[in-house]
Amino acid sequence: MKIETKSSVLITGGAGFIGSNLCEYFLSEGYKVVCLDNFATGYRHNLKDFINHPNFRLIEGDIRNATECQNAVQGVDYVLHQAVLGSVPRSINDPVTTNEVNVSGFLNMLVAARDAKVKRFIYAASSSTYGDSEALPKVEAVIGKPLSPYAITKYVNELYAEIFSRTYGLETIGLRYFNVFGRKQDPNGAYAAVIPKFVMQLMQLESPKINGDGNYSRDFTYIDNVIQMNELAMLAKNPTAINTVYNTAYGDRNTLNNLVDYLKEFLSVYDERIAAVEVEYGPNRSGDIPHSLASIEKAKSLLGYNPKYSMQEGLKEAVEWYWNNLR
């Protein structure tokens, strides 16, 4: 599904989990890839397999710096904006920095993309935008009130993107990611995502610590499904498919208890002792929504989205990667 070999893609946050996977994929498809990252949450080791690729260029810079954003978009056809300060708890602890990166930085990138006349701006939106809406499945047109500073910033991104589309003619597409997981996802740090964190704990024969009773549910989404959505958003020709937002998920939900059971099953193939590791439970986390399930009908209809990996299939791939790379 290449556009043409001379197409150039800027991936902000390209040294992060999702961004580095996108860099690797688009390089393999013949694109020229520019990566902009300040390495606040990304890692140089995520780039090691392609850092010397002739079509890859790394720019170390910060989206909070408007000049660096302007420099990064020069000669670029498409922007895949993944740069974000993620994590609901981090945003609760530090709302100011979260806003600076996720709102001011996002606006800098929109202005830079507009001024450089890029063909399309695809950005990482978030399922957190659904907030306190209890309706399931989550449909793009129905959202609730945000439950965290992070959720506010991601909703503001959507509002700004819509205004730039209407006012300046910049083509934008937002992808509301639902609990993305897979290779290169960081298992360390205070704000580590649940799947790599649980994997590391289980590999060390430590008890995973679940917030709540484990019955909260999520639409866990494997990284390759997310890559597919970014490419489809970039290639979309139908005018009705552009200047809107899409759920980016598998369209199924599993509880955290289900998740741990699957992880123990898949990891015990490598170390049978893992099957006997007990789970610990603690209080619910502030800002968390109880249940999340995406409708992916809009993406199927307008983009031709066809996710290849269920949570279980993705977990098998992810577990193998973690076992081989992070022990």
Image: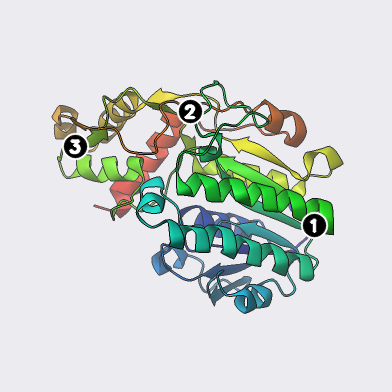
Residue tagged 1:
170
Quick one: 269 or 130, which is closer to the camera? Answer: 130
Residue tagged 3:
271
Q: Is residue 3 left or right of residue 281?
A: right
Kind of residue indicated by mark 1:
Leu
Residue tagged 2:
292
Kind of residue indicated by mark 2:
Ser
What is the x, y in percent for residue 314?
44, 35
Q: Residue at x 26, y 35 (%)?
A: 267
Q: Residue at x 74, y 48 (%)?
A: 162
What is the x, y in percent for residue 303?
74, 36
Vertical position of residue 10 compared to residue 292: above or below:
below
What kind of element bears circle 1? loop
- Between circles 3 and 2, the one closer to the viewer is 2
Quick one: 324 or 175, which is closer to the camera? Answer: 175
What is the x, y in percent for residue 299?
69, 33
Vertical position of residue 318 compared to residue 325: above or below:
above
Q: Residue at x 22, y 36 (%)?
A: 209
What kind of element bears circle 3? loop
What is the crowding at mark 3: few (fewer than 14 residues within 10 Å), some, or many (at least 20)? Answer: some
Kind of residue indicated by mark 3:
Asp
